[in-house]
Amino acid sequence: MSFEPKIVGFLCNWCSYTGADLAGTSRIPYPANVRIIRVMCSARIDPTFVVQALAQGADAVLICGCHPGDCHYSEGNYKAMRRFPLLKQLLKAYGVEDDRVRQTWVSASEGQRFAEIVTDLTERVRALGPSRIHPELLNDQRER
Amino acid sequence: MAIRVNPKLIDDLERYGAEDVQKCYHCGNCSAVCTHVEPGFVFPRKPMRLLQMGLEQRLESSLEPWLCYYCGQCSSQCPRGAEPGETMMSLRRWLTSRYDFTGISRLFYGSWKAEVAAIALVGLLTAFGFLLYGFSHGNLRIYDGPGAFLPSPVVHRFDWTMAAVLVVLLAINAGRMWWFTTGGNPRIRAPFSAYLLQLYMLPVQFFTQKRYAECQSKRPWFLHLWLMLSYLTMLVLIMFFLRVVQAGPQIRWSAHVFGYLASVGLLGAVGYAIYGRSKKTEIHLRHSHESDWIFLLMLLGVTLTGVLQHILHRSGAAMAANVAYVVHLGLVVPMLSLEVPFSKWAHLAYRPLGMYLAQVHRAATARAASVVPSPETVRIAS
Amino acid sequence: MEELKIGFYVCNCGTNIAHTVDVEGVKEVAAQWPEVAIARSYRYMCSNPGQEMIVNDIRELGLNRVVVAACSPRMHELTFRNACRLGGLNPYLFEMANIREQCSWVHTDKLVATEKAKALARGAVNRVRHHEPLDPLSAEMCPETLVLGGGIAGLTAALELALAGHPVHLVEKSDRLGGNIARVDLTAPYFYSARDLLADRLTRLRATPNVSVHLHTQLKNLSGFIGNYTATLETGNGDSAPRQKTIHIGNVIVATGYKEFDASRITHYGYGKLPNVITSFEFEQMLRSGRIQTQSGRPPRYVAIIHCVGSRNREFHSYCSRVCCMTALKYARELKSALPECYVSDIYIDMHAFGKGCEDFYRKSSEVKTLFLMYGKNEQPVIRKADAKDDCEMLIEVDEKLSGERIEIPADMVILMVGMEPRPDAGEVAHLVNISHDKDGWFIESHPKLDPVATTTEGIYIAGTCAAPKDIPDTVAQARAAAARILARIAKGKIEIDGVFAEVDPERCSGCRMCNELCPYSAIEFDAQAKRSHVIPAVCKACGCCVAACPSGAIKGRHFTDQQIYAQIEGVLA
């Protein structure tokens, strides 16, 4: 029985969520490990969402937005682009491997690409094994 | 090396029957539906393009018009009504006039009145000549035997002389055709062996026209073959058995039956063609150039007068038969001497020659492709 | 806290979901979750009986939350929200779980897919507990409209609004109305006179009192939101100092038009160097003056028209400028009728003859013996001066694709069909009115198929060639469409602002002002007196970037609150 990672994906409504839907209408298969949560823009994704997901037992988090220049709200994805490298630095200190939090861009026409990204992420995280940090983070989270 | 476009050519070709070439927008439906298209010989689209652009040199050296039998499928497929079939026909007329070194062909195609005048002139001269001979050497009331107005040996000698002149004229023009398309064409380097090996095509195509049978419907091929074989039968009878068929007034069935069959064939085919052209019953009969009508009417006249003089002869009306014979000769001579080398009938030589040369071209292309390709040969191979 | 009664519905979608996900299993598991009052499965939830099921359950069971596990919310969220509304429940007390596009259609293992469907459903149920009822807001609608640009689009839109009885401010940068259509002689494919079209517009414009025309005027500033805009106009013709004027309007129509491509950028056409190489607009001038002649004053014997100058070209613009093909054919016809002895060559890549009457127009230009020569996109023709012995001024050399030959075309005059480009001030205009433009510079519409004249900024409309190259019929259609949209809004009297927007909690706001700059719509104002920021609901697009950025956590993103999302995270991972 190989380890089945649990991945939470935050997808922006206009591009990446639509792209994931396109993978569906095109019947492009990908591993079932990802659970998608819809936000209107990748700029809405608070770093605490990522932390909360990891705390609740996610082995990886996927953040998808529109390609730079194509954001439905003009610059939201640039803001997201700035936030997450900082978060990943912080998470590194907690022992969260770089591969566990991925930020990428998927356009509404990139169904195939979305499937490829999910497949690749799933395999990488499977190789890494289960996330080991959640009890510690969970304690920190309770205060909020 | 860029070729200059000549937008005036398309105006010139109107005289040859190409009225709608400019409508072609090169969708390629015509070439798609043509059964005779093959690599290296794509038509009618390519000749239409060369014509639109006025690339005279390329047109003159092309064989494609002779590979077409005008089944008319292309014209019925054309979404724009550009009449590719009729354009190919016009190109055949144009090429006929280009191959002809005398310039008479160009004159005739340019003006049907000139053609009719020439026919009348030659006809009257012939009739006059024969009348002169007849009155000086014979008796108008006598058809057969001593004192015959037009004895068959004399007519026979005349026929052969005329045939020799025609053959020479046609051979010169056919030679020019070879030069334009193959010999003088820098893009084709044909090995001598190809000429020899493909030689069988000439008689095969001439006698059977089997490529015509490959067109969508077999009926035009059949009718044309019937017409041609009837005519050939008649020609053989006249050239080689004149004395036999002219001997009378009894009917010699073993010889005359061929003549009767041939006459029926000729009249039937010509009648069908005249009817078809008047009523525009089939695609290839919808457009009629003056040269088409002149050809049919001449052939009809010749056949009818020939039949008439035969009937009159066999029923004993010698004087009437002689008069009919003179009229008949007055029609036959212009028909053969003008139509064969200078007008529509020239296709009897050019078409089989075209198909033969196409085979030679193919052999030349195949050989060029097997050699290390230079840019020019690569172009030919595509 | 009210007692929650959640209605859970899972759809079979025929076999689309049911063939991979054990729909009954999901239903049974959901029925066990706390506060789920009813769990049902149905073949097609989006069908009328499916929706009625929801409506009836809300009424009979007193449901106050509804979850549907089915296709993508992008498909049917509106359908089910409407069903809730019909049942008497606020439509925002609804959530969907996507178990089709993002589950049954992409996974093959039934067990795994079912487990995922359950997790997604759980996430939705968790989330919906924290949903709040949301109602739209209402604001006044000012009936005055600002139209930017006095070309055919602007004139048409202004007329449409004025004749309906509403005041319009027509702002034109240059010294006259008419735009690019004033430079055209006859139009394709019916040869209507452009001058007549324009004259018609101008006459009717002068006859109506509702239009204030501002020439030599530009928009300097625009603030506010739909129904309540304030615009600052600046008028200056260079002679005197510029004057400013402030107006109040409800909506703006941007109809700023296009400019033509500068042909001198393509050096091998010799524009600017060879005297008889001219652009399409220069030829229009010749047509209007009634004299077609070369620089030496003689009528040309050979004319060549080259398509796609600056268009369909990776080096300059990859798009097609749409009107040039038919305009070129128009020139061919006009040349042949004015100079019957002239030989016209039309050198094109593809013939775009798409609209009404255009295919016939193309055929007719073939019939008048226009010679059509096709070249390849990447192998442009080269124009050079002819030798003295040639019977023409210039020779054009090109690889002609339909014959496969490299040819030389004689030409005494060459007409370059220059493409359309966005005006150089398009970026500035977009920024002023808060709309976006694409990589080519054309303004972006709200939806390329379903909403061609609106933009993502409410109250700002685009019409005509400023949005993309198009012909006069489409320009006029768009102008009238934009005017009609505005008239519909004005008729309603008030505007309804969607209930989903960000809200600043004044108690928590520290006045750091980070959010003011972050908002791409400038929807957050800072109240200098109270030293707090405040979101203008009508302008807010609910992207949420301020919500995530606020260091005090003072901004709540309605319908996408932190609480809702945390609950959903917990649910999908359970």
Image (spheres, coloured by chain):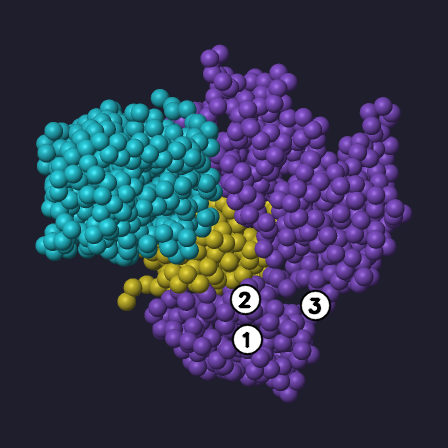
Chain colours: A yellow, B cyan, C purple
Q: Is residue C293 rendered to the left or right of residue C266? A: right
Picture coordinates of residue C87, whole percent (x, y) = 66, 80
Q: Are marks 3 and 2 in contact (CB under 8 Å)?
A: no
Q: The residue marked by circle 2 belongs to what chain? A: C
Q: Which residue is mark 1?
A: C46
As drawn, which residue projects farthest toward the top? C388
Q: Residue at x 46, y 65 (%)?
A: C101
State which tag comes first along the sequence, 3 or 2: 2
Mark 3 = which residue?
C134
Label whose residue precedes the other's in the sequence (1 or 3) = 1
Front residue (pair C89, C349):
C349
Which numbered circle lies on residue C75? 2
Q: Amino acid at mark 1?
A: Cys
Quadrant assignment, res A12: bottom right
Q: Which amino acid does the dot numbered 2 rest on?
A: Met
User: Looking at the picture, does residue B56 appear above or below residue B318?
Assistant: above
Q: Specify few, some or many for label 1: CA neighbours under 10 Å numbering under 14, 14-19, or 20 or more.
A: many
Q: CA distance from mark 2 to mark 1?
A: 10 Å
Number of residues whose C-alpha sits closer than 10 Å to that of mark 2, classed few (under 14), some (14–19) or many (20 or more): few
Q: Nearer the viewer, mark 3 or mark 2?
A: 2
Q: How many residues crowd mark 3 within 10 Å: few (<14), some (14–19), many (20+)?
A: some
Front position in the image: B201 or C17: B201
Image spot of residue C222 (x, y percent):
77, 43
Q: Are marks 3 and 2 on the same chain?
A: yes
The reply to whether the C-beta atoms of the residues labelled 2 and 1 are less than 8 Å apart is: yes
